[in-house]
């Protein structure tokens, strides 16, 4: 079974940095694109970032471009999201999601990790 | 950027009702559209991809149709487990979700 487990969410002050991780299992991690999607409290889903299977190609939403960096370590079956210059608008549950190809729907999702940006 | 607009935002229905949710894209996305179901406190679950392809283990009362800019998700006979929020997502050009449709008990 596919398993995605996010970690790293925390309460962080505005302007701070945080790194999220997503541990993957149950599928050949290095063969699939991976993404981060977030959901602010009481709001809808917002795509954040996507990385190709090799890690060569990355894509970020305009709202996080220049502040967030998606990466992966295929030998560790782990996806990362490095977040910096955080603001209250970044407060959300962050989900990692598995794609089929680099431009694809998301067929499996983790349970999410909460990032709260507040002083 | 391609914008996705769902309607209605909220839908009140009873068990056994036929329910239809509409999703419109601001530009043509062919059939590169997915539908997800999300329950409170849970991760989204993929229901349909490529506009009309039902995922395995998803009940056949769910169906999707459309192409270009207009799409629908239909639940043929609403069941108690179906009360949730539904999102469409285009993956033709980057990724964008609709704002969601909450299906609540009438």
Image (cartoon, coloured by chain):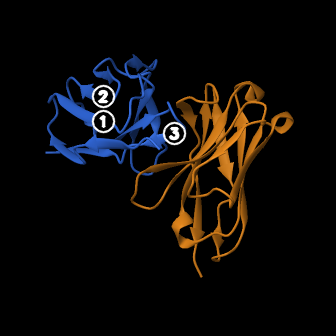
Chain colours: A orange, B blue
Q: Which residue is mark 2?
A: B71
- Co-location on one chain, circles 1 and 3: yes
Q: What is the C-alpha distance between the residues marked 1 and 3?
A: 14 Å
Q: Which of the two labelled residues, at mark 1 and mark 2, occupies the earlier sequence position? A: 1
In this image, B9 relative to A119: left or right? left
- The residue lying at 52 percent from left, 35 percent from top is B93
Quadrant in the picture for the N terminus of chain A: top right
Q: Is residue B79 above or below residue B97?
A: above
How far is disc 2 from disc 3 in space, using C-alphas?
A: 16 Å
Image height of A107 relative to A21, above or below: above
**Residue A84: quarter of image:** bottom right
A107 lies left or right of B7: right
Judged left or right of residue A109, residue B84 is left
Circle 2 sits in a helix, a strand or a loop, which is it? Answer: strand
In the current view of this chain or complex, which residue is farthest to the right? A75
Instruction: Write down the residue under mark 3.
Output: B95
- For the question of whether residue B25 can be seen, the reply is yes
Q: Position of residue A67 (x, y in %)?
A: 68, 61
Q: Chain of mark 1?
A: B
Few, some or many residues within 10 Å of mark 2 (<14, 14–19, 20+): many
The answer for how far apart the CA atoms under marks 1 and 2 are is 5 Å
Task: Count the marks.
Answer: 3
Residue A38: percent from left, percent from top = 53, 52
Secondary structure under badge 1?
A: strand
Verify CB contact (< 8 Å) between mark 1 and mark 2: yes
Label 2 or label 3, whichever comes before in sequence order: 2
Chain letter of the residue carrying label 2:
B
Residue B83 percent across, percent down from the top left = 28, 40
What kind of element bears circle 3?
loop
């Amino acid at each position: 079974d596919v398993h995605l487990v996010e970690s790293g969410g925390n309460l962080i002050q505005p302007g701070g940095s945080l790194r999220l991780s997503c541990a993957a299992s149950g599928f050949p991690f290095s063969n699939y694109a991976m993404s981060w999607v977030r959901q602010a409290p009481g709001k809808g889903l917002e795509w954040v970032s996507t990385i190709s299977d090799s890690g060569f190609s990355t894509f970020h939403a305009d709202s996080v471009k220049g502040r967030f960096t998606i990466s992966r370590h295929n030998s560790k079956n782990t996806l990362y999201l490095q977040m910096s210059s955080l603001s209250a608008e970044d407060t959300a549950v962050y989900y990692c999601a598995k794609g089929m190809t680099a431009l694809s729907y998301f067929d499996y999702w983790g349970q999410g990790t909460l990032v709260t940006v507040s002083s | 950027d391609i914008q996705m607009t769902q309607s209605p935002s909220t839908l009140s229905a009873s068990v056994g009702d036929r329910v239809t949710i509409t999703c419109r894209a601001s530009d043509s996305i062919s059939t590169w559209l997915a539908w997800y179901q999300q329950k409170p406190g849970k991760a989204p679950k993929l229901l349909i991809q490529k506009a009309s392809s039902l995922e395995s283990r998803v009940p056949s009362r769910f169906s999707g149709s459309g192409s270009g800019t207009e799409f629908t998700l239909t639940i043929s006979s609403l069941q108690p487990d179906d009360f949730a929020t539904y999102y469409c997502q285009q993956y033709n050009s980057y990724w964008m979700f609709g704002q969601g449709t909450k299906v609540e008990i009438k």
